[in-house]
Structure formats: structure tokens, C-alpha cells
Amino acid sequence: MWAAFWDALVEVGGRKIVVALLLLALGVGFLFNRGVKFETLAGVKVIYFGPVSMGPWAFGVPQVLAQATVVSTTIWVMLMIFAGAPQFVVMLEKGWRELTFSKGTPRWQLLLARFTSLTLLFAALCLTTCLPIALRTWWQTGISPLSIFGGVAIGSFIFASLLSTSALASMAGTGGVALPMMAPIAGFVLSQFLLDRQREVFPYITSEFWRGVIDWLYYIFPKCTELQNAASAFVQSSTLPTSWPVWTTGLFTLATMVTTLWILERKSF
């Protein structure tokens, strides 16, 4: 399983590509850092993020870190879906499966190794992106940036829930990467519309039946938008406003992964 874990990282594009992704994440972090300025207004030390004053350090620094965490999460969700989704398809390709499935390692361990390695790589990229701005604000203001670890953990939870849909889609597909890529992207975009369904969707759908269907879709699918809001709130206050999006998304991810592993174990090649 440990070998499969490292193999998934290598198949993202090789060790050099992984290093390049980390350097890219660091570069994006320095771009965020360029937008941060420290000024003094009427004797009060304030922080600017771009042209906008975020207020005194005690209030502004957590807001800046929260924005950086949410933006980095969004960027890497999109990029890592394109980099990670094909890994489940590759695992089922002829040649690779004969080489690995014939060994003693159970299939479920091979899939979970890929799932875990991609999620941890995502977390590493998000943390690397937030690192420059976190260290600078800590050095300048003395305000601890440790809460970004919680924000990145929530962001990684979002990615894991979307990655589970990619793994399931790879079982239902015919070998192409289009469905495993589009399924998580659709889930990420759909979460915004489901959250704002009263304003975005219901004005165009008057049937109570179909409104009920949309409500159930909201209850079942990952709450990506709400989790992003929860990540922002955690970075700012080290507390979660509600556990609703966490446990419902967790149940979805667990059910999706169990179904995927069951299909994989029963699949004949």
C-alpha cells in the first residue's frame, strides 16, 4: 500500500512535476503576499489586502489569512481535479491492472493509497500557497497563523469529497478521463446553486415535486460552498459556525468511497 501511495504521486507527472507544483504554489503565495501592506491610520496600525483596508491588525490579519486560504483552496481544487482524477482511470487500464491486481495487495488498498496521496498533496499545495503571507503577517504583527491549518484541513475535506465522486465515476466510465474530471467539477459548481436554490433555482421551477427533489440533492451532495465559509470562519475565530456541512459531506464521502470499493472488488477484468 505504501508503494501504491508513492506511485500515485509519481503518476501525477513524476517527482519533478510534484516539485514544480510546490514551487508554483509558493509562487502564487508570494503573489498574494505582494497585495498585503501595513499602514498606520490615525495612530492605529491597520493591514491592507490590495486596495481594501481590512482594519486593525487584530481583526484584519485573520481576515487576510481567511481570504488567502479560501482562494488557494479554490485554485487547487480545480487544478488537482485535472491532475488527480486520471489516476483512478490509469489504475484500471490494461497492463497496469495485470501488473498490480495480480499481486497480494488488496484492490481497496491500492485505491485508498491513491485517494490518500492525492488528498495529502492537495493539503501540501494549499499550505505552501498560504505560507508566505502567514509568515509575513506573523513576523510583522505577532498574530499566530496556526488557524490556517484548520482552514486547509477543511479545504482538503472539500477536495476529498469531490475526489470520491471522481473515483466512483472512474468505475462507471469506459476508460476515458472526461467523466471522472467533470463529475467533481459539476459537484463543486452545483453546491453554490443548491445552497442559494431559493434565489437561484426556485424562481424558475414552480413544481413542488421538483423543488423537493432539489432540496434532497442539497441534503445529499457535498456542501462545498458552506465548507469554504466554514474554513474562512475557522481561520478567523478558530471555531466552526455549524457542524451541518461537515458531517453531511462526511457521510456522502464515506458512502461514495464504500460504493466505489465494493464495485472495484466485484469488478472482473
Image: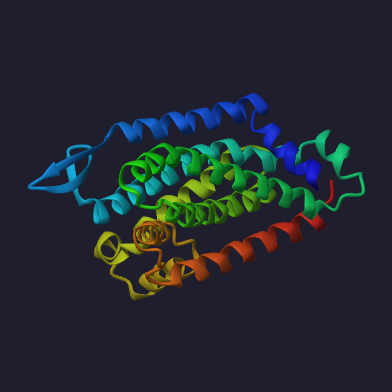
Q: Nearer the viewer, residue 266 or 4?
A: 4
**Residue that appears at 81% across and 57% down:** 265
**Does the rendering let one see residue 174?**
no
Q: Nearer the viewer, residue 76 or 33?
A: 33
Q: Quadrant of residue 118?
A: top right
Q: Nearer the viewer, residue 56 or 182?
A: 56
User: So how many labels did they put on this image?
Assistant: 0
**Does the rendering let one see residue 232?**
yes
Q: Quadrant of residue 131?
A: top left
Which residue appears farthest toward the left when viewing the image? Answer: 42
Residue 10 in picture, x, y percent from top left: 70, 32
**Residue that appears at 18% across and 47% down:** 45
Q: Quadrant of residue 124?
A: top right
Residue 242 in picture, x, y percent from top left: 40, 72
Please give left or right for residue 160 compared with residue 26 in the image. Answer: right
As displayed, is residue 113 above or below residue 233? Answer: above
**Residue that appears at 83% across and 40% down:** 97
Please give left or right for residue 95 compared with residue 81 in the image. Answer: right
- For the C terminus, the quadrant is top right
As displayed, is residue 254 above or below residue 124? Answer: below
Residue 141 in picture, x, y percent from top left: 31, 47
